[in-house]
Amino acid sequence: MKVAVIGGGVIGVSCALHLARAGAQVQLFTEKELASGASGRSLSWLNASGPWPADYYHLRMAGIDRFRTLYANNPDINWLKFNGGIFWSDKTNEVQEWHDIEHARGYDSQRFSAADIVHIADNIDPTAIKNTGIYNPGEGWVNLPDLIEHTMAEFISLGGILTEHAGKTVPLLDAQHVTKGVISTNNGECHCDKVLLACGAATPKILAEFGVDLPDGSVLSMLAITQPANNTPTVVLNTPRVAIRPHPGNALAMDHSWYADDIKEDATGNFSVPDAIVETLLAEGNRILKSTTPLTLANYKAGWKPVPADGFPVLGALRDIPGTYVAFTHSGATLSLIIGELLSWEIINGKSHPMLASFRPNRFNTK
């Protein structure tokens, strides 16, 4: 079977590798370079915490399981760790609700008070915690560009073909509206048996060109990377005004949602963030962490974060474009390995996997 994968983010790369492992001839097309979209600016917190529906919770847990296997096989890597996650909120009821749901599912969820934080992470200032929080010791983080590089090495070794800077690439259909390959701006036509579209926030716009309405809730986001710092936390922090995770090289990655409306996109597709927002994010990090030197910015990246309109993944065959599959989700980090495994199985076997049943494109009655 010949399969074309469109999209060089972590979902596309994971699917491409699993297809190649299954014996398919796979060519991966990227508009620019690998990890140039949302995967290059993701906080990539590996978790299943919070009040998710049961089917989504189970999919996320399977995703975490695959990352644990990856880490067990590569214990010396510095871009994937399982040192736990911490969540706190200014809303006491929210913390209690999350904890009750997590505890009922058997998700390792431990309540803590501000005074107790020193026993979990001694470089967090207890005065930054207004009420109480949750410690989830089984959670982790991954730096997606490093994961993509690691994944692509195996993909190439299996005979996979990587075509970067292909420009815009879309499915190529025959007169009966059946997929027969892909066509890209810089590489022309490439015929194949099946196509997977995994283009992040661009996915709904591409499908709209083929008459497929995929409701889109994508939002603007920004990830800031600090200069190397001392006494950085090893856990992931999800707090009311800043989310923080470790980053390779003793740096920190930081983001949040409160400034999304202030990110600007110009006519050429470049994004900018007011200096005051970056300064506020760093100041919030400095307020939370006990550090002898203030955090300083190394760089930031901004752009669209892919989010389906109802917040849940869109995965599987497109009813109205036979031979084309779609993978569109905002939870690309946690789900990337399990989506690659299950969706590639569907593409190879032409069957539906029960774990993806709730996430089909036709739930939106697409045409």
Image (tube, rainbow, N blue to C red):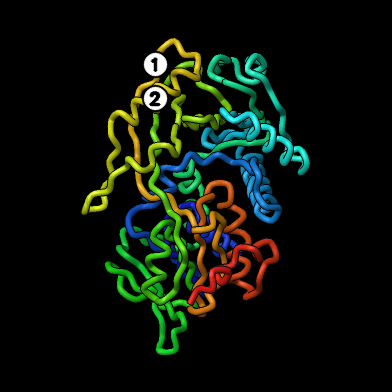
Quadrant in the rendering for residue 262: top left
Q: Is residue 203 above or below residue 135?
A: below
Q: Amino acid at mark 1?
A: Pro
Q: Amino acid at mark 2?
A: Leu
Residue situated in front as seen by the camera: 82 or 319: 319
Q: Residues within 10 Å of mark 2 (few under 14, many from 20)?
A: many
Rendered residue at 59%/29% (across/down): 88
Q: Position of residue 271 (x, y in %)?
A: 28, 45
Q: On the rendered structure, is 261 left or right of 348?
A: left
Q: On the rendered structure, is 223 left or right of 66?
A: left
SS of the residue under disc 2: helix
Rendered residue at 57%/60% (across/down): 18
Residue 294: which numbered mark, if any? Answer: 1
Q: Position of residue 234 (x, y in %)?
A: 56, 25
Residue situated in front as seen by the camera: 103 or 292: 103
Looking at the image, tell me whether mark 2 or mark 1 is earlier in sequence order. Answer: 2
Q: Are marks 2 and 1 in contact (CB under 8 Å)?
A: yes
User: Given the current orientation, which residue lies at the most extreme left position?
Assistant: 267
Rendered residue at 65%/14% (across/down): 115
Rendered residue at 50%/73% (across/down): 366
Q: Which residue is mark 2?
A: 282
Q: On the rendered structure, is 112 left or right of 212?
A: right
Q: Position of residue 71 (x, y in %)?
A: 62, 40
